[in-house]
Amino acid sequence: MAGIVCRTASRIISSQASCSSSVVAVRHSHWFTSMLSLKTSVPLRAEPKKKKKVDPRREIMMKERLKKKLKKLERVPPEMIPIEDFITSAKSFDDTRVREAPELSFEESERRALLLKEWSRYKRSQHQTEMLVIQEALEAQTQALEELKLESEELYKAAVSPDTDIFPFQHDGPCYTPPLTSYEAPEGKYNDITRVYTQ
Amino acid sequence: MAAPFTRVFRPFWRIITTTTSSRGVRNVSYTSQQWSAQNVKTAGAASPWALHGAVCVQRLPVVSQDRSPIEEEFMELMSKMEFERSLLADHELKLLDDAARMSRKQEEDYDSDEEEDYRDKEIVTAQDLEDIWEQKLKEFQPALRSQGNDQKEASSSERCLADSLILLVKKDVGSQKLWLLPQIQWQMGETLRQTAERALASLPGADLKATFLGNAPCGFYKYKYPKDIQKEGSVGAKVFFFKAVLSSHKHLPLENNSFAWVKKDELQDFLKPEYLKQVRRFIMAL
């Protein structure tokens, strides 16, 4: 501001000087106290500018407040991975897929009820025999261990110690037909369309 | 552990166990005097019982068992009920659509331009797909469930695929030849499980690989030697059985006369009654 004032003043002065050379200490405007002291214009003579010390602190405070607000907004919990088994697909609610339920005759429903009861009795007896067999085997083992204890303590301790080599234990269970000895399965490729979710 | 029993069963079994323990009363009364004196000594130092380790190798079933009549009926009923309560599948919907389209084609005012999706494509109906699948299934010949050699050879491990079989060995015991589970005498410095493993490995001509189920014996049998063999300090023998599961299925056929793979029901034809009684307890054929 002061510089601009100086430049305009110098232009004015030079223009004035060109027309009247005898002007030396004439005040052309109240802004100029003297020609020689052009640099001291009124605004410069005022108090020095107050540097607001609180400003940088205030700015820092503002930034922190904004950051905190941002963090609060970002603290959204991660989206849960959906369990595919628990979601009933929309296909199940399709009305076009409803199967006509046949009407059961009285005899048929009676037969079904009686068969279910027969089955529960059969399963119960099966379970009991299984439990008896297991108990028998367990008793045989405890008796064997007692006899071994009578024989020798060392062997008994070795028998009772846990076996670490047995696990992992693998055995192929029974199938419907036994495996063909000279069978080569045909080679094929399959597209795995399982959905993989990342959090 | 085993499920809780009804009250009727517990006292029943207590009676049975007391009678079984009183079976060996003679032996117990004889040995108790010996034991109290010798309890402090080292393992097997002066016990009158020779220790043997035996192995009960089981070939587990390869094929599922046949269903009993009630199981068949129930299976049918369950599949029917499930079918009735189900919704139509994609394949069935396609079948219905194809049927509807065929019926539309048969009508007189059929305009093929009205069909939306099927104008220029080759149509493979769902019924065609079903026929193709059936054809493919017929081309595959699975192995037979029962090989038919159940009654013939007792030494083949391929017989009775639906049951679990146990290996029996014919052995000279004293003057007789008896069918036993493979056993061998215990040596100093090895555990009984190692004895059982040795018993399995030392079978002549058999290359059987089995996984032993744990360190503990599953049963025991003790017998007294006949009086003429009884020396000082050896009254009889105790045999401890260990269970094992046959792991490798392919092995050479064993000699007919000395080996047998036997179901639980057939054990009584091979084993002596006392021995059988103890062995039956831990063989679970469900």
Image (cartoon, coloured by chain):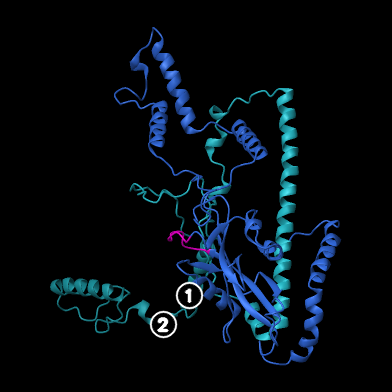
- Disc 1 residue crowd, few under 14, some 14–19, many 20+, Cα 10 Å: few
Nearest to viewer (mark 2 / mark 1): 1
For image coordinates 56% across by 36% down, the residue present is A92
Q: Is residue A12 above or below residue B32?
A: above
Vertical order, A103 against B246 (above or below): above
Confirm whether residue B20 shows in the render: yes
Numbered disc 2: what chain?
Answer: A
Label 2: element kind: loop
Mark 1: which amino acid? Answer: Ile
Task: List x then y, in percent, for residue B143.
Answer: 44, 44
Q: Are there few (<14), some (14-19), or many (20+) residues within 10 Å of tag 2?
A: few
Q: Are marks 2 and 1 in contact (CB under 8 Å)?
A: no
Residue in the picture at 74% in, 38% down: A118
> Alpha-carbon distance for marks 2 and 1?
25 Å
Q: Nearer the viewer, residue A185 or B68?
A: B68
Q: Residue at x 50, y 70 (%)?
A: B203
Whether B233 is among the magenta residues is no
Q: Is residue B260 left or right of residue A183?
A: right
**Whole-percent x, y for residue A19 in the image:** 14, 71
Asked whether residue B213 is in view, the answer is no
The residue range painted magenta reads B246-255
The residue that mark 1 highlights is A60
Compared with B207, B40 (above or below) is below
Where the N terminus of chain A falls, by quadrant?
A: bottom left
Give the chain ID for the blue colour: B
Point out which mark residue B143 bears.
Answer: none
Q: Position of residue B157 (x, y in %)?
A: 50, 56
In the image, which lettered chain appears cyan?
A
Q: Amino acid at mark 2?
A: Pro
For the residue pair B18 and A38, the one nearer the viewer reads as: B18
Q: Which residue is mark 2?
A: A48
**In the visual, does A1 lie left or right of A175?**
left
